[in-house]
Amino acid sequence: MTISRDWRRQAGVTRIGEAVYEAYTGALGSLLETTALEELQRDPPAPARPAQPPATSKEPELDQDLWLQRTWGALHTIDAELARLTHAPEQPEQRTISSPHGCLTLHLRGTGITAITADSARVAGTDTEQLRFETRLLFRTYELARPGGTEARR
């Protein structure tokens, strides 16, 4: 990702955070698409299966009371799982990481980036090179702050 020398006209001081976030999500989408295409090329196609005749049940027909009992049991199991998920443990921690001079701020939920905002007053006094530096260090700090950091990936 690069920041154009014409960023003030293209995104403006007030929208630069959104523009950086859009570029980040676009790059992430491209990476996912490329990875998926590589995986598809590595996996050999599955052989075609011959058409199967319609399945016939070999199980004896359940009487209505037993069927109703099993259905209610399944519904209670699903209801309990739904209640457990609805009252799931606390939401992932929300936090922020700021660039060195506070021009940009990453907003995180858990380890995922949910937004990037900009301090308009600080960005207004920033030139292109300084904004590039702030952006690079912001993402580098994020990478180092993630569980395992870059050391776990080497």
Image (cartoon, rainbow, N blue to C red):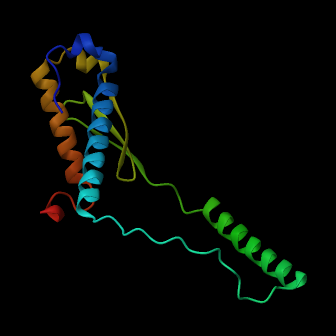
Q: Residue 118's spot in the image, x, y percent?
A: 31, 26
Check the image and report above or below for 28 versus 122.
below
**Residue 85 picture quarter:** bottom right
Check the image and report above or below for 146 versus 141.
below
Q: Residue placed at 19% from the left, 15% from the top?
A: 125
Q: Nearer the viewer, residue 95 or 8?
A: 8
In the displayed orientation, state which residue is furthest to the right: 65
Q: Residue 47's spot in the image, x, y percent?
A: 37, 69
Q: Residue placed at 51% from the left, 55% from the top?
A: 91
The quadrant in which the C terminus is found is bottom left
Q: Nearer the viewer, residue 101 or 152?
A: 152
Q: Residue 142's spot in the image, x, y percent?
A: 24, 47
Evaluate whether residue 1 shows in this view: yes
Q: Nearer the viewer, residue 26 or 111?
A: 26
Q: Nearer the viewer, residue 131 or 47?
A: 47
The quadrant in which the N terminus is found is top left
Locate residue 1 relative to residue 67 in the image: left or right: left
Q: Residue 147's spot in the image, x, y percent?
A: 27, 60
Evaluate whether residue 118 shows in this view: no
Locate residue 47 relative to residue 6 in the image: left or right: right
Total number of numbered labels?
Answer: 0
**Residue 76 picture quarter:** bottom right
